[in-house]
Amino acid sequence: MKTAFLFPGQGAQKTGMGKSFYDVDADARAVFDEASKLLGIDMAALCFEPDERLNLTEYTQAAMVTTGIAMLKVLEKNHIKADVSAGLSLGEYESLYYAGVLSAKD
């Protein structure tokens, strides 16, 4: 059986996204911490607490990509891999990250 990862686009964001990964995995927390440092935004607070900024494009996109990369770190650690990946709109960036074309800093 083949496995595919499909990454959602902007508009799929919701308060609490990625929290279950963040709460139990150091690598997921590290992704949120690194994004916070790079962007000057508390990404955990933005994603996990009610915050109107989550629906503003400049914050939504950072939150979605950060969450996607954090989830990928947990999947990778658990040896869960995809044969193919794709993304809808903004999700293309997470797919490109998964394929090794982009780095997290990109």
Image (cartoon, rainbow, N blue to C red):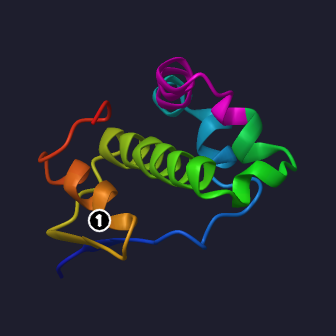
The residue lying furthest to the bottom in this view is 1
Magenta residues?
A: 31-44
Callout 1 amino acid: Glu
Residue at screen point 83% across, 53% down = 52
Quadrant containing the N terminus in the rendered view: bottom left
Residue at screen point 17% across, 79% down = 2
Question: Residue beneath label 1, please?
Answer: 92
Task: Judge from the rendering whether residue 99 lies leftward or rightward of residue 40; answer left or right.
Answer: left
- Assign the magenta stretch its main secondary structure: helix
Image location (x, y in percent) of residue 95: 26, 60
Q: Nearer the viewer, residue 31 or 54?
A: 54
Residue at screen point 66% across, 55% down = 17
Image location (x, y in percent) of residue 24: 63, 34
Image location (x, y in percent) of residue 7: 39, 68
Image location (x, y in percent) of residue 38: 47, 21
- SS label for mark 1: helix
Q: Nearer the viewer, residue 74 or 99?
A: 99
